[in-house]
């Protein structure tokens, strides 16, 4: 489940230590609903892009499942990035913007964009290494 990606066991508070357990559970439930909506949105975008492929080049059902799971894992890892780093990484990788263009759009230095990109590539490397284990 996406909500548990990168979560340490000691990061979950014991129910006996919670001052407002109902509020805590409400927050957890709200985040699960948001994550579910994001997951569905990702799946719809993936299926829409597959529909554009010629039938001869479309991946098999097994390949689709593997690709979709990889997309979910990558989405979860990128979600761990700070918002501006995630935005910079996606602007570069999905929109093809240069570091100069990203710096101008985010109103940061090119050096900061370089740092953001390193964070993004580091997250992708984590996914690749986890897949080899």
Image (cartoon, rainbow, N blue to C red):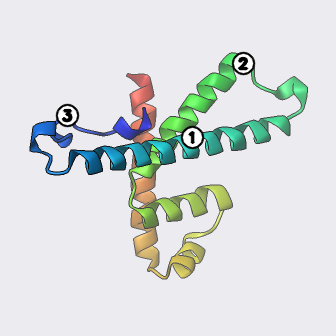
Q: How far apart are the two marked residues, 3 and 2, measured between alpha carbons? A: 35 Å
Identify the residue at horizontal 31%, vertical 43% (top origin). 25
Residue 19 in the image, given as x and y percentages of width and height: 14, 51
Residue 80 in the image, given as x and y percentages of width and height: 38, 50
> Mark 1 highlights which residue?
39
Q: Earlier in the sequence, mark 3 or mark 1?
A: 3
**CB under 8 Å between callouts 3 and 2?**
no
Q: Tell me if residue 71 comes above or below residue 120 in the rendering.
A: above
Q: Tell me if residue 88 comes above or below residue 53 in the rendering.
A: below
* Secondary element type, mark 1: helix
Q: Tell me if residue 26 comes above or below residue 109 in the rendering.
A: above
Given residues 35 and 103, the one toward you in this image is 35
Q: How far apart are the two marked residues, 3 and 1, measured between alpha carbons? A: 24 Å
In front: label 3 or label 2: 3
Q: Which mark is drawn over residue 61?
A: 2
Q: Earlier in the sequence, mark 3 or mark 2?
A: 3
Q: Residues within 10 Å of mark 3 (few under 14, many from 20)?
A: few
Dividing the picture into quarters, in which one does residue 42 lie?
top right
> Mark 3 highlights which residue?
9
């Amino acid at each position: 489940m996406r909500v548990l990606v990168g979560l340490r066991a000691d990061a979950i508070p014991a129910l006996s230590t919670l001052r407002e357990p109902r509020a805590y559970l409400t927050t957890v439930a709200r985040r699960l609903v948001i994550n579910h909506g994001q997951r569905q949105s990702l799946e719809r975008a993936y299926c829409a892009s597959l529909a554009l492929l010629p039938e001869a080049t479309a991946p098999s059902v097994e390949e689709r499942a593997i690709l979709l799971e990889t997309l979910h894992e990558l989405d979860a890892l990128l979600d761990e990035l700070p918002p501006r780093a995630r935005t910079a990484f996606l602007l570069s990788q999905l929109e093809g913007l240069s570091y100069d263009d990203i710096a101008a759009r985010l109103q940061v230095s090119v050096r900061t964009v370089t740092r953001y990109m390193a964070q993004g590539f580091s997250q992708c490397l984590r996914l690749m290494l986890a897949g080899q284990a």
